[in-house]
Amino acid sequence: MEQQSSQVDVESLKSSVRRRGNCVDAFLGMSILILFVAVTALAVGGMLVVKELRSELQAPKSEFARLGITDSPSPAYKMQNFAFLKPIASQLDNMTMPWRSVTFFRRTSVGSNFQYDQSSRSLKPLKTGIYFMYIQVNVSCTYKCKAGVLKVEVFNKLTCNVELTADVEKTTVSKKCWTVEQLDSNELVALMTVPENKLENWALDLNSSGLGIFLVE
């Protein structure tokens, strides 16, 4: 009788182990499935973010159109939250860069939530928030240019280093830099820095270079 009871206990234990094993397998399978779905969602989300950021770095006019800023009386994205400036000096030197506003769709490119001071060459956001800021630097070689690094820094928030190689022909070097930052009402100035040997015969393209910023939230 005791031997039969022992056999029953062994069989019961084996059955319990099998059930537990099946539960563990099911749990592991479900965990792997959930992990796969999460990774896939993150990958898709990352691709969408990259695509969105690339679209932010298009030409200024395309940027206005993308944000819904048109000549209609009620634009989807209010112009007051956007500012775009173009440089007015083509020489490359150690200086605070001067800028100018432009006109798009009969509106100034500096929204009412910003203030640009021509004398101090500074752009001031009037609202505290998260801002997307980018700078487009296009530099052309006019004749027999030396190599060097051109640095443009905006208020310690955005730094753009443009590497220039020695060239004897008319060549254009382009670089786009961007950042997303929490900003208050401090003035933003862009400082240009060149190496000690200067960057003679290199010139900033005034039409295709620019500084853009808009309020995200």
Image (spheres, rainbow, N blue to C red):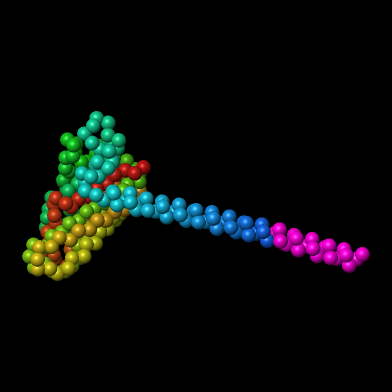
- Farthest residue to the left: give it: 143
Examine the image and state in which quarter residue 65 appears.
top left
Dominant SS of magenta comes to helix
Residue at the far right in the pictured view? 1
Please report the residue visible at 63 percent of the width from the left and 59 percent of the height from the top: 25
Quarter of the image that includes the N terminus: bottom right
Q: Position of residue 144 (x, y in %)?
A: 8, 68
Q: Quadrant of residue 137?
A: bottom left
Residue 92 visible, this angle = no
Viewer-nearest residue: 176 or 68 = 68
Whole-percent x and y of residue 93?
A: 14, 60
Choose top left, top right, bottom left or bottom right for residue 115. Answer: top left
Query: Can residue 1 be seen here?
Result: yes
Q: How many numbered discs, if any?
A: 0
Instruction: Decide if residue 201 is on the left or right side of residue 154.
Output: left
Q: Residue at x 29, y 52 (%)?
A: 54
Q: Residue furthest top?
A: 73
Relative to the observer, which residue lies in front, 108 or 184?
A: 108
54 versus 146 height, above or below: above
Establish if 169 lies above or below 105: below
> Which residues are the magenta region?
1-20
Question: Is residue 17 part of the magenta span, yes or no?
Answer: yes
Q: Is residue 143 left or right of residue 46?
A: left
Q: Position of residue 192 (x, y in %)?
A: 19, 58
Magenta-span inclusion, residue 162: no
Across and down, in percent, residue 128 comes to 34, 43
Q: Which residue sits at x=25%, y=38%?
A: 69
In the visual, does 13 lie left or right of 21?
Answer: right
Residue closest to the eye, 101 or 106: 106
What residue appears at the point 27 percent right and 34 percent down from the top-left corner?
A: 75
